[in-house]
Image (cartoon, rainbow, N blue to C red):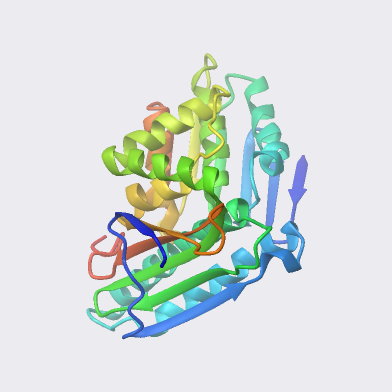
Amino acid sequence: MTNSQTFGSYKERSGECEYLTLAFSPTNAPLRTRWRNNGLSADFLGDYVTTFLPANGGQAAVGSRRNEIKYAVTFIANELLENAMKYHERNVDIPIGIHLELASNYVTVSVSNSVAAPQAQRYKEYVENILQGDAAEMLLKQQEESAAGSESAMSCVGLLTMISDYDARLGWRFDEHPAQSETLTVTTSAVLPINNAPGASA
Amino acid sequence: MKNIQGESYEIRLDNSTVFFKGSLRLSGSEDYAPILEMLKETLVHPGAPIVLDLRVLDFLNSSGITMFSRFVIEARDHAGIHLHIVASEMVPWHARSLKNLQRLMPALHIRLM
């Protein structure tokens, strides 16, 4: 039996609406090559989403809104993939997965990767911190600390930016592996509202 | 004039103006260090306004956001620095994230075109 723990507004993959899943085996390529792949995959997901956006409103508004949503999906996918590549436990044969789902009024991007148990514990503590605090304030504090040279090993500027600048609702799920107690799979989900997309009313 | 170029980006320092172009997704502070150093060169001659032209910087990852934050904090802590950012309404991250730099440095002047 798998032991799971969820934090925040974790969104399960439903598989009921339009969706797309990509998987990477990170042991097969050097980091630099994989890093390039983050950008290519994120750009692809951003482009993919625009194909399915409902065409409400005037033409100019639609164009601007699509551009906003496309950028937000690309940014979120890129950041989640970067985190997964950085923190992925390489000694296990579990791929990094990115999943995108389109519902009528929101988009979900979720990324899963495996992490060593101590790393997972630190991440849980950070996640609880994010959920209790004000993301915009935490972002500023983090940047001041980073400039002063006291940056923590896990900066999470990407996660805080998703919440603060893109109105994304984040959630996390940690799954223990039945056979490998030293390794967990962490899945981060980001839900982006489409109707209230960043800049939609601008 | 100085230039830093990568597969998806180009950065050019011309007097006290730094032009950014393309998509910046480098993997962390080490990879961003040469760009941050180029930005810091503009702080050597206080008095002349420093301009960061980001109008065609289409994408910036969180490590890039941190690099700009570090520069803005350093500029804020120097006396007599006038820092201007020129940005575009057509690039979604500009309106969304540049305001955070202004919170770090209230005297920062941002022009969205």
In the visual, does A121 lie left or right of A58? Answer: right
Total labels: the figure holds 0
Place of residue B108 in the rendered image (x, y in percent of width and height, measured from the top left): 43, 31
Q: Based on the displayed image, in which of its 4 quarters is residue B35 positioned?
A: top right
**Residue lying at 67% horizontally and 42% vertically, measured from the top left:** B32
In the visual, does A107 lie left or right of A158? Answer: left
In the visual, does A56 lie left or right of A165? Answer: left
Considering every residue shown, the one lying at the far top of the view is B79
Residue B52 appears in the rendering? yes
Residue B60 appears in the rendering? no
Frontmost residue, B94 versus A117: A117
Place of residue A157 in the rendered image (x, y in percent of width and height, measured from the top left): 47, 43
Q: Based on the displayed image, in which of its 4 quarters is residue A107 positioned?
A: bottom left
Place of residue A197 in the rendered image (x, y in percent of width and height, measured from the top left): 29, 64
Image quarter hosting the N terminus of chain A:
bottom left
**Residue lying at 51% horizontally and 35% vertically, measured from the top left:** B69
**Residue lying at 45% horizontally and 32% vertically, measured from the top left:** A142
Frontmost residue, B9 versus A196: A196
Image quarter hosting the C terminus of chain A:
bottom left
Where B22 falls versus A54 (above or below)? above
Place of residue B74 in the rendered image (x, y in percent of width and height, measured from the top left): 55, 23
**Residue lying at 23% horizontally and 81% vertically, measured from the top left:** A56
Where B54 falls versus B43 (above or below)? below
Where A168 falls versus B71 (above or below)? below
